[in-house]
Amino acid sequence: MKITPTISTPAQPKVEIAELVSEEEVNPWPATGLRRLWLIGFAVLLLAAFALSLILGSVNIPPGDVLTVLLGGTPGRSTWTDIVLKFRLPKALTAMLAGAGLSVSGLQMQTLFSNPLADPFVLGISSGASLGVALVVLSAGAVGLSSLSFLAGLSLLGNIGIVAASSLGSALTLVLVLFVSQRVQSAVTLLILGIMFGYVTGAIVSILLYFSLADRIQAYVAWGFGSFGGVTWSQLQIFAPVIISGLVISYLLIKWLNVLLLGDNYARSLGLELKQARFWIVLSTALLAGSVTAFCGPIGFLGIAVPHLCRALLRSSDHRILMPGVILVGAIVALLADIVAQLPGSGVILPINAVMALLGAPIVSWVILRQRNLKAAFGR
Amino acid sequence: MRNNSTNPRRFWSLLLLSLLCPTLLLACGDPTATIVPATSSLSTTSATTTTVPPTTGIAAPTTTTVATSTVVPATATPIPTTTAASSISTNLTDGCVTNYDPNTDYFPQKATLKYANGFKVEYFKNYKVITVLTPWRDAKETFQYVLVQCGTPAPKGFDKALSLNVPSKSLISMSTTYLPYLDNLGLLDKLVGVDSAQYVSNPTVKKLVADKKVAEVGNGAKVNVEKVLDLKPDLIMTYGLGDPQNDAHPKLLEAGLKVVLNGDYMDSTPLGRAEWGKFLALFFNREGQAQKQFDEVATRYETLASKARVATPKPTVLANAAYKGTWYMPGGNSYSGKTLVDAGGAYYWADDKSSGSLPLTFEAVFDKASQADIWLYQDYAGSLEDIKAADERYSSFAAFKNNKIYNNDLKVNENGGNDIYESGVANPDVVLADLVKIFHPELAADHQFVYYRLLAPKK
């Protein structure tokens, strides 16, 4: 027997969802000013990290010259103008946007599935993207350069081609996932289907790799390392608006996310349309995670670790505080990892995924271990 | 409380099972040990008439091996007849000896190595010993092969080496770099298998595969051992990576086949790598012919290089391209790096000591080399527009603005196999001529581009 939940009707006063999830219930700190201080601290740290990422790099440029270039003057060496404006500035912006985007989508996935291990790629978005890229990169050698094959043509476009293929892969995955999400009842089913889809695409990619030339495999693996340095200004003109719109959508979903913390049934009883909420959450996640994967390659770690870091530092699971926190901390972590990966002064570069995990995992583990009850963060 | 009758029975059956499992595993054989012919300290036999003195004791670590049979059954019983030393004037490139004479030097034509440092060959009256010193990067072992003239008895004392009869009558080649030498020596009729025909450029070989006279057997971990056994090759020549998971030779050796490791890719000089043609020729007793062909190549190379190295002005050279922020630049001591210097280019990283690639940041390369005169792109690109589309920052390079970007894809087969990695290895003088034509056109005015082309704007 199905119990119809109380749906807000004109006769009843509409329950203000925000009032139910009061700060006191999920926040042990009565003084809210302390958390605002944290956020301001994060913002300052972000500015510092941004400045540092412009100053530090594989080529040694004195900070004074960096400032000169930013203000439009001429630095000591002519190549430095191009380096700061065409290489470091877009890279720093990309890192911030990617870090924020991935962290927010990770946060949403963790709330939607009530699972601390969920990350933005749990719906198979990164798998769809990697399949698109694999089809393009690994087929590059299979047709002559003068051929009109669509896939080979995409690969000849280089960066743009890979971005297009990756977006296409993510978009198709998104459509599939949205279609399924409207038809399954529980979020767990959606989760498992996403994982299964990931397996299938992973298998197809393996088969493609098996039959490929060594240098094409290297190109594909190099894509898998992830990098913020490949995004140019013209690509940022697409990347930045997409990420910002994804962040805006996520920001508007804060109320619903808070309600979802209380569990599906309670949420329904408060008038939340689960299917609608799921639709928008999945859409914004796919938009954020898919575009980051398209432009930067698959970047792991941020989506799963930064929300936990924020929950522990801010002692809250209220999305009104967590969302801005996660955006700031995500940007900071991405910037710092990129600085370290550049190995300033050495001219050699490390893959960003490796650096992020190496530095971040111990820090996050330490922070988590200090927290007493992780489950409470999910409202249980 | 203890259960009555089931407990002791369960206990003993569990015990039996736990004892059986490891014994079964052991009986199935240890999967990690690979059968690898290791070195042996050379016990020198009679070698008074040879021109190459044998070395004593090659220091090499022993590896765990299963000894392969060293006594090669002779096709005809050797009958020492006359006491007078008979001599032959050329190596026997066909058939076996019928009247074995222990005083005859069966290899009057000998290979001497000048550039290749990855292998050594020592001659004895009726057998040759080849030692491959650098089969792969950071190899801890060397490989020794005893090539016994067919029809003569096998020497004793080479238990750890792989012994085979020469001249070989059939061959499976697991790399396209061996095919040009087979063609030049007229040995393509001995080819019975290749790893894959997809990236082969040699037209004769492609026709042989299409006519089903040469089979495709796969490579690396994917090698089709049954197919190889079915072909019954006298010899399989392959390269090794030192990675048991991805190397084909451990599996093939285990199956009892004669597999030799060719380490040509480890040689970092163009002439050194080309000299490995002699390695291949040794197995067919054609080292005399190979020596002559290589000498011509080396002479042409050295003549041109000596002129190019001192020609002025030297153009500054940049190579390869960035991929997602990382630029894999050839090291100064690498095969590509050395070729650039030999062709008379001022390569920015010529002083670097590494023989592989350097993963540099795009930024660092831009800082150092954005004003390079010549850019050898060496990646997938049809025209200048493709380069700009790959990354708009490439258009800031001087070579882009001056239309001086070259790509090495003039000879690419329909599947993307680039001939520069096939015949280009055997003919480094042609590759050099292409590069000299780019750097110092006046020195190679009569030469037409074979592998390189100037990238033009798309029509």
Image (tube, coloured by chain):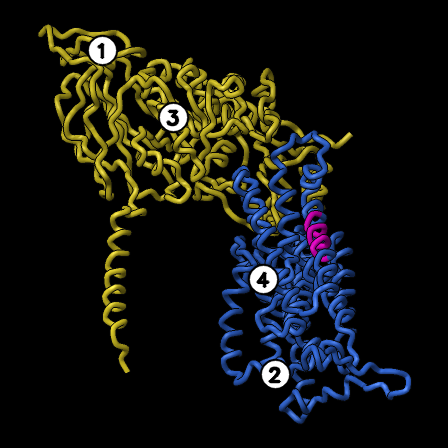
Chain colours: A blue, B yellow
Q: CA distance from mark 1 to mark 4?
A: 67 Å
**Residue A169 lies in the magenta stretch:** yes
Q: Are marks 4 and 2 on the same chain?
A: yes
Q: Are marks 3 and 2 on the same chain?
A: no
Along the polypeptide, which appears first: circle 4 or circle 2?
Answer: 4
Q: CA distance from mark 3 to mark 1?
A: 27 Å
Q: Are marks 1 and 2 on the same chain?
A: no
Residue tagged by mark 3? B230
Query: In x, y percent, where is residue B238?
Result: 39, 31
A180 and A138: which is toward the camera: A180
Q: Which mark is residue A300?
A: 4
Q: Which range of residues does the magenta coloring cover?
A: A165-174
B161 and A283: which is toward the camera: A283
Instruction: Please name the amino acid that badge 2 sits on.
Output: Arg
* Mark toward the viewer: 3 or 1: 3
The prevailing secondary structure element of the residues shown in magenta is: helix
**Residue A3 lies in the magenta stretch:** no
Q: Chain of mark 4?
A: A
The C terminus of chain A lies in quadrant: bottom right
Q: Please tell me in which quadrant of the rendered image residue A94 appears.
A: bottom right
Query: In x, y percent, where is residue B260?
Result: 33, 30
Q: Is residue B110 above or below residue A60?
A: above
Instruction: Please name the amino acid that badge 4 sits on.
Output: Gly
Residue tagged by mark 1? B97
Disc 3 secondary structure class: helix
Q: Is residue B287 above or below residue A65?
A: above
Q: Chain of mark 3?
A: B
Residue A22 relative to residue A211: left or right: right
Q: Chain of mark 2?
A: A
Q: CA distance from mark 1 to mark 2?
A: 88 Å
Q: Chain of mark 1?
A: B
Q: Are marks 1 and 4 in contact (CB under 8 Å)?
A: no
